[in-house]
Image (cartoon, rainbow, N blue to C red):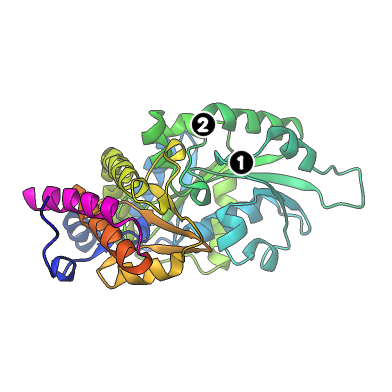
Amino acid sequence: MAPVPNGFLNVSREVDLRSDTVTKPTAEMRTAMANAEVDDDVLGADPTVSKLQQQMAKIFGKEAGLFVPSGTMGNLIAVLVHCEVRGSEVIVGSESHIHHYEQGGISTLGGVHSRTVPNQEDGTMDLHKLEEAIRHVYDIHYPVTRLICLENTQARCGGRCITAEYTDKVGELAKSYGVKLHIDGARIFNASTALGVPPETLVRAADTVSVCLSKGLAAPVGTVLVGSNEFIEKARRLRKALGGGMRQVGVLGAAGLLALDMVGRLGEDHRNARLLAEGLNAIDGLSVDLANLDTNIVMVDVDHGLGAEELHKALKEHGVLCLYEGHNRIRVVTHYQITEDDVHYALACFQITFKKVFKGDCTTIHLLTSFFFLHFYSH
């Protein structure tokens, strides 16, 4: 096979695999935002966001919905509503977004104590350990458990899908102890797509769900909380206190409505993630657990003690952006702005960069690089 020509990686091209949060609004979204019918949502009068809230509630089989600026605020509001008594306890997964990435807001702002249960490889928590973590009102030594939180998909476990059957079991357990169940559904539509199960089925056991519109669905901002009418009424008051009440928010709601049209193409992201993962797994020194790849998040381990941070920086020089996850791991995420050709280009960059930085198996890398180069330029 012919070698890759000099300068191949110096073309002006960017493949942004950092996250599905980097997606730009579509042209249709921008037009809809410009033409959105709006009013003051703090006064409950914005027709566009009201339509979005109603539509989301219907999709997830709940009574009502509430638009909030971010998933972090959505989760915070949910926890604070369910744990109205200060000093209450919420059980979260050890790898959950709430535990790792939300600045401990539930304790800082709500006086809520969190208790972690280890997430298993598939993103679930062992049901026996979950039950053991529930603390009862009759023991004065402990905070009272009032809420369990699940995350679907489970991002830090590699975008793993949590099944309806497992969620139903957690819901039954929670109900038996008088505990509420909230689902951080930032990527719940990815789970629905991968499992072939309607969103409503995945959350039927949950009291509340937060659903992000600004990840793989391309909206510029926004999450919708769904739950009972009583819950949403309390959530609306908390949103105001947290500064999340906005005026003519229909401008954002219009993008959110069109984001729902993006759900049908998430399978393409999953296929591109699989293609990317298989290519990376074929490079000596890199490994991806293909058996645990469910959706659009690919965790890549840099083996043999080589530096993931150095690889991450070297890739950036060639326009391939990813996230450094620490130690020997990087993360890449596919989304609607990543095409199949982008995947092949990224793989070529990985292979050549890996050879340059780490002096890997040159024969293997040369053959793979030539293959992906030829594929890329044949399209």
Q: How many marks?
A: 2
Within the image, what quadrant is residue 34 found in? bottom left
On screen, residue 91 versus residue 339, left or right, reads: right
Per the image, the residue denoted by label 1 is 120
Of residues 204 and 53, the one nearer the viewer is: 204
On screen, residue 111 versus residue 254, left or right, reads: right
Give residue 60's position: percent from left, percent from top: 45, 36
Question: Main SS of the magenta segment?
Answer: helix
The amino acid on which the numbered mark 2 sits, given as a three-letter code, is Thr
The disc placed on residue 360 is none
Give residue 215's position: percent from left, percent from top: 37, 54
Q: Residues within 10 Å of mark 2 (few under 14, many from 20)?
A: some
The disc placed on residue 163 is 2
Please tell me whether residue 47 belongs to the stretch shown in magenta. no
Give the residue drawn at x 32%, y 52%.
256
Question: Secondary structure beneath disc 2?
Answer: loop
Residue 379: in sight, yes or no?
no
The amino acid on which the numbered mark 1 sits, given as a three-letter code, is Gln
Q: What is the magenta range?
A: 359-379
